[in-house]
Amino acid sequence: MTKAADLKVGDLVRITKPVTLSGSVSGQVPRETRRVWKKLAQRRWPVRIYEIDEYGTPWYRCRFRRNSGGWEHHWLAVMDADANWRLVRRKLN
């Protein structure tokens, strides 16, 4: 199994399901994050890792079309504790 620390910029990751628990301080994932994960799992195509921050955490971004025609944007980190993602394809160097 791939760990979050093994991911590189350009790797494709599929969000497989929303989860309810995480390693967050409160012990629960915010409702908005669960909603985004649910939408990503339903649309079935992967997200691309676009950044590795100074702590080695990989990040992806996504957007969804709103009913009003505008866009909602989200930036989320990939964490080992979430267990709702899997590597789809490694970036070729």
Image: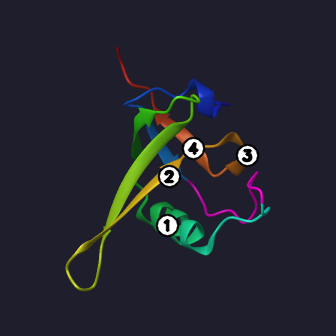
Q: Considering only order in the chain, which callout, 1 or 4, is on the residue closer to the N terminus?
A: 1
> What amino acid type is highlighted by mark number 2?
Leu
Label drawn at residue 78: 4
Q: How far is mark 1 from mark 2, CA to CA?
A: 9 Å
The relative height of residue 88 versus residue 70 in the rendered view (above or below) is: above
Which residues are drawn in magenta? Answer: 16-25
> What amino acid type is highlighted by mark number 1?
Val
Q: Considering only order in the chain, which callout, 2 or 3, is on the residue closer to the N terminus?
A: 2
In this rendering, position of residue 65 left or right of residue 2: left
Looking at the rendered structure, the number of numbered marks drawn on it comes to 4
Local crowd size for mark 4, using a 10 Å CA cut-off: few (<14), some (14–19), many (≥20): many
Q: Which residue is label 2 attached to?
A: 76
**SS class, disc 2:** strand
Q: Which residue is label 3 attached to?
A: 81
Q: Position of residue 32 (x, y in %)?
A: 54, 72
Question: Is there CB contact under 8 Å for labels 1 and 2?
Answer: yes
Residue 24 colored magenta? yes
Q: Which residue is label 1 attached to?
A: 36
In this rendering, position of residue 87 left or right of residue 22: left
State the quadrant of the N terminus. Answer: top right
Q: Position of residue 28 (x, y in %)?
A: 74, 65
Question: Is there CB contact under 8 Å for labels 3 and 4?
Answer: no
**SS class, disc 1:** helix
State the quadrant of the C terminus. Answer: top left
Q: Is residue 33 visible?
A: yes
Question: Is there CB contact under 8 Å for labels 3 and 2?
Answer: no
> What amino acid type is highlighted by mark number 3?
Ala
Q: How far is mark 2 from mark 4, CA to CA?
A: 7 Å
Most distant residue in the left direction: 69
Local crowd size for mark 1, using a 10 Å CA cut-off: few (<14), some (14–19), many (≥20): some
What's the residue at 47%, 67% (across, down)? 42
Most distant residue in the top direction: 93
